[in-house]
Amino acid sequence: MKKTLMFLVCFLFLCGCKQTTADKLMKLGYSEEDINLIEKLSEENQNLFLEDYKETELSYLYQPDFREENLEEYLNYHGLLDQERVVRLVNEGILNKDSFIKLFELYNHPYFIEKNEEKYLRYLNEYDSLRDMIEIVNTQRDRELFTGIESVDLSKGDLMLVNKYYQLSEDYVPDDLVNVEEGYGRGRLKKNAYEAFVQMADDAYKFGYDLRVVSSFRSYSYQEGLYNSYLKYDTLENVDSYSARAGHSEHQTGLAIDVSVPGVSLDDFYKTEAAKWVDENCYKYGFIVRYQDNKKDITGYIDEPWHIRYLNKEIAADVYKRGITYDEYYACFIE
Ligand SMILES: [Zn+2]
């Protein structure tokens, strides 16, 4: 009788010790929901969770696209990229030890634009320089010029973007054009741009530079005539590098000015000290030199040190400081 009792006690004791995996997990602090997910894993992976409460590992089990065979790979990149992104890129075979550094730089790049992600990934290995690739994608220069043309977003006001991909309508005329007064040049400009120019010209004069507006607002039809007149004696490709097609000219916004000093043609303006002063100081008045020599491939225009574009003081200073084109600045910070 005694023996039977002892046997029964031992039996019950042993039963109590034989815990299931679920029991062990629960003791470690996993919830029922966690346990359900863990129990779907292979034994080897389940054991990982039996060591202690694995918060990081667990978080991957909750990702909608979680694939068990990639768990180890996810963990390699944990915390370095956004978790959802790690799962997606590892699953697609894009994120691996060879591509990791480039992808890390890409996703942390100051000019990374979310909506361009697919293109960045497509071109990731096509360019030697990641920065060049980002710039090309952001400014849409992976497309032929004048393809997929969109309307200029007028709601952006003085910050609107006009280029070879963004066009103004035939009837667009700024509503607050004012005349350029004698002594400052000729033509008409949007009020804000004109007032900023007067301030700049007055300050420049103190340094001995007599800045004048040589060309200002141009209507759609005027630009059309101008562009066509160049076409009479030059190739289309050449003309597109120095003259805008109708609707694609910043001059139609009333915010752009071709500037020079008396007796100096636009082509020779770059030789003057005044040009240097404009280049270094115009941002203080809200202007940028829009078409720079080192950005020809991006803007599609030759170097135009005489063509300044009004934005506002804050944005112009930021564009100047960053040394990027307004096309890219707009895509990153305004659009
Ligand atoms: Zn111009």
Image (cartoon, grey):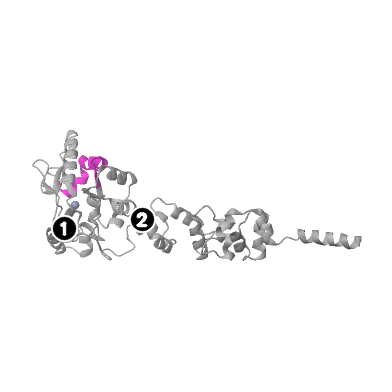
Q: Is the residue 199 above or below the residue 265 in the image?
A: above
Q: Which residue is mark 2?
A: 135
Q: Secondary structure at mark 2?
A: helix
Amino acid bearing label 2: Glu
Residue 276 visible at all: no
- Residue found at the far left of this picture: 182
Labelled disc at residue 91: none
Q: Is residue 200 left or right of residue 124?
A: left
Seen from the viewer's position, the closer of residues 201 and 118 is 118
For disc 2, the neighbor class at 10 Å (few under 14, some 14 to 19, many from 20) is many
The C terminus - image quarter: bottom left
Percent coordinates x, y for residue 101 in the rendering: 50, 55
Q: Position of residue 183 (x, y in %)?
A: 10, 40
For the magenta stretch, what is the residue range? 264-288
Q: Amino acid at mark 1?
A: Tyr
Q: How far across and down, in percent of the image, does residue 164 sit?
A: 25, 60
* Disc 1 to disc 2, C-alpha distance: 30 Å
Of marks 1 and 2, which one's residue comes earlier in the chain?
Answer: 2
User: Circle 1 is placed at which residue position?
Assistant: 172
Circle 1 — which element? loop
Q: How many marks?
A: 2
* Left or right: 1, with 129 as reference point: right
Residue 195 or residue 321, whichever sits in front: 195
The spot of residue 165 in percent (x, y) is 26, 61
Q: Is residue 42 visible?
A: yes
- What residue do we see at 38% from left, 59% from top? 115
- Would you say the residues marked 1 and 2 are in contact, meaning their CB atoms lie under 8 Å apart? no
Q: Which image quadrant for residue 242?
A: bottom left
> Which residue is painted at 58% across and 57% down in the image?
58
Q: Nearer the viewer, mark 1 or mark 2?
A: 1
Task: Name, please, the residue furthest toward the top.
Answer: 206
